[in-house]
Image (cartoon, grey):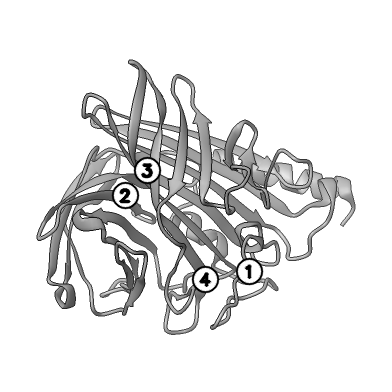
Amino acid sequence: MPAELARRRVLALLAASAATPVRGQGFAGLGQEAGGFAMPRPDPAFRFPRDHGPHPQFRIEWWYVTANLKTAAGADRGIQWTLFRSALAPQERPGWASPQIWFAHAAMTGPEAHLVAERRARGGIGQAGVTPAPFAAWIDDWQMTGHPGADALDRLSLRAAGRDWSYELSLAAAGPLVLHGQGGYSLKHPRGQASYYYSQPGYRVTGRLGWPGGAEEVTGLAWLDREWSSQPLDADQTGWDWFSLHLDGGDRLMVYRLRDGGAGHVPGTWISPDGRAEAIADGAIELAPLDWTRIGERRLPTSWRIRIPSRGLQIETRPVNAHAWMGTGIPYWEGPVRVTGSRSGIGYLEMTGHD
């Protein structure tokens, strides 16, 4: 494809994405057809730090950080920082001919406000990208960077800003990376749709928020997700509800439900305080909505009950701000939650595809 034609195609796609929200599956819909891209296979052999970088032979990929924070006065705050890569074709090309589309979402949330910003970029010209060593992920002046001497994702600096708000945070990992599913191969459907999926769930956070009412010093916990695929969902799956939870005593839990009009696909990962991970099979977790919130024309399940009988776990999650709607070009709900029940804690909830 000539470079000028590729440039025009990419710019047209970016303009269309800015004007027309994607419905149905949120950003999952970017990867419903594989279209010649590579597919995840069982028994992956990850190589780090290489795999912290991009995988252009796969269609979609993201670097995703959420953090539950407290101010010195005890106020709840949450932040999100996400960089997405979506490819138009599986063959990489230099410069304007690159098929890579980059977009990013950032948010800062408290009980009284949910602040959102979005960036878009194209590949091949340095405006956005990821390098594995030294680790750096960026789009314009939004940055997630590693520290000299640290092992790739062990220590990170994170920054983003919206119109009247900003944050600058330091993250220090207190445990190992966690591979989800079967050694990082995360099956999404019995017909074989899957992704490669791992996390760093154990960051301690310090830093400063530029909250609209003034600067705030904060501390807390963060969770980073890394995932890539080419066809993560089946045609009968309409979106997901995903939880990352920090429980009292140091345990952590990742659970998601892929909705299909029935019981859905509901796997998870239990992470012990020492970082050991145990996959929880589909069918072993009970996930049910408790309360709903009306946001515009949408009605979303913003409070949930999670039961894992094998762990004696029965908890409820409640949002810090029930109106944490990401009104971005690809819309979804994402915000911090509080946990009560047989265990207390904090965490994040993401919901896509609730039209």
Which mark is first along the chain, 1 or 2? Answer: 1
- The residue most toward the top is 214
Q: Which residue is mark 3?
A: 67
Residue 64 shows up from this direction: yes
- The residue most toward the left is 341
Task: Determine whether the residue tagged by mark 4 lies in a helix, strand or loop.
Answer: strand
Q: Looking at the picture, how far across and down is residue 294, in whole percent?
A: 23, 42
Q: Nearer the viewer's eye, disc 1 or disc 3?
A: 1
Q: Residues within 10 Å of mark 1 (few under 14, many from 20)?
A: few
Q: Which residue is mark 1?
A: 47
Q: Nearer the viewer's eye, disc 2 or disc 1?
A: 1
Establish if 126 lies above or below 317: above
Question: Looking at the image, which is closer to me, 293 or 346?
Answer: 346
Label 2 and label 1: CA atoms lie apart by 28 Å
Establish if 60 lies above or below 327: below
Label 1 and label 3: CA atoms lie apart by 26 Å
* Residue at image point 49% right, 67% down: 197
